[in-house]
Image (cartoon, rainbow, N blue to C red):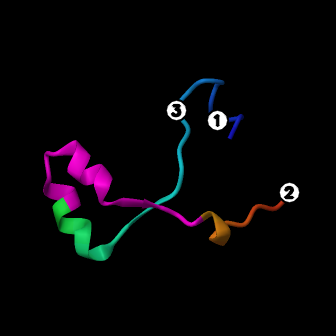
Amino acid sequence: MRHMHRPGEEKRSVVILRPEDWEEWLMTSNVEAARAMLRLYPSEDMVAEPK
């Protein structure tokens, strides 16, 4: 990630949006409601390998 972001910049992560929330997430104008629908991808399911 350091190749993509300078120190102090906002970091990004993989998130999951449940299929039953898709329509509301796309249509809502309430940013907090949209953020509340997002779930972090479980870290135990992530895999990292050296190049």
Q: If you read the primary sequence from the N terminus, does the residue marked by circle 3 or circle 1 appear first?
A: 1
Q: CA distance from mark 1 to mark 2?
A: 17 Å
Residue at x-position 14% and y-position 56% = 27
Residue at x-position 56% and y-position 27% = 9
Residue at x-position 24% and y-position 68% = 21
Q: CA distance from mark 3 to mark 1?
A: 11 Å
Residue labelled with disc 1: 4
Task: Specify the segment rendered in magenta.
Answer: 25-42
Residue 37 on the magenta span: yes
Residue at x-position 13% and y-position 46% = 29
Q: Amino acid at mark 1?
A: Met
Task: Give the residue furthest to the bottom.
Answer: 20
Of circles 3 and 2, which is in front? Answer: 3
Residue labelled with disc 3: 10
Q: If you read the primary sequence from the N terminus, does the residue marked by circle 1 or circle 2 appear first?
A: 1
Of circles 3 and 1, which is in front? Answer: 3
Q: If you read the primary sequence from the N terminus, does the residue marked by circle 3 or circle 2 appear first?
A: 3
Q: Looking at the rendering, in which quadrant would you find the C terminus?
A: bottom right
Give the crowd class for mark 3: few <14, some 14-19, many >=20 residues within 10 Å: few
Residue labelled with disc 2: 50
In the rendering, at what x and y percent does residue 5 appear?
62, 31
Q: Amino acid at mark 3?
A: Glu
Q: CA distance from mark 3 to mark 2?
A: 24 Å
Q: Quadrant of residue 22?
A: bottom left
Secondary structure beneath label 3: loop
Looking at the picture, does residue 9 appear above or below residue 26? above
In the rendering, at what x and y percent does residue 35 appear?
31, 50
Q: Is residue 1 left or right of residue 32?
A: right
Looking at the picture, does residue 9 appear above or below residue 1? above
In the rendering, at what x and y percent does residue 41 appear?
53, 64
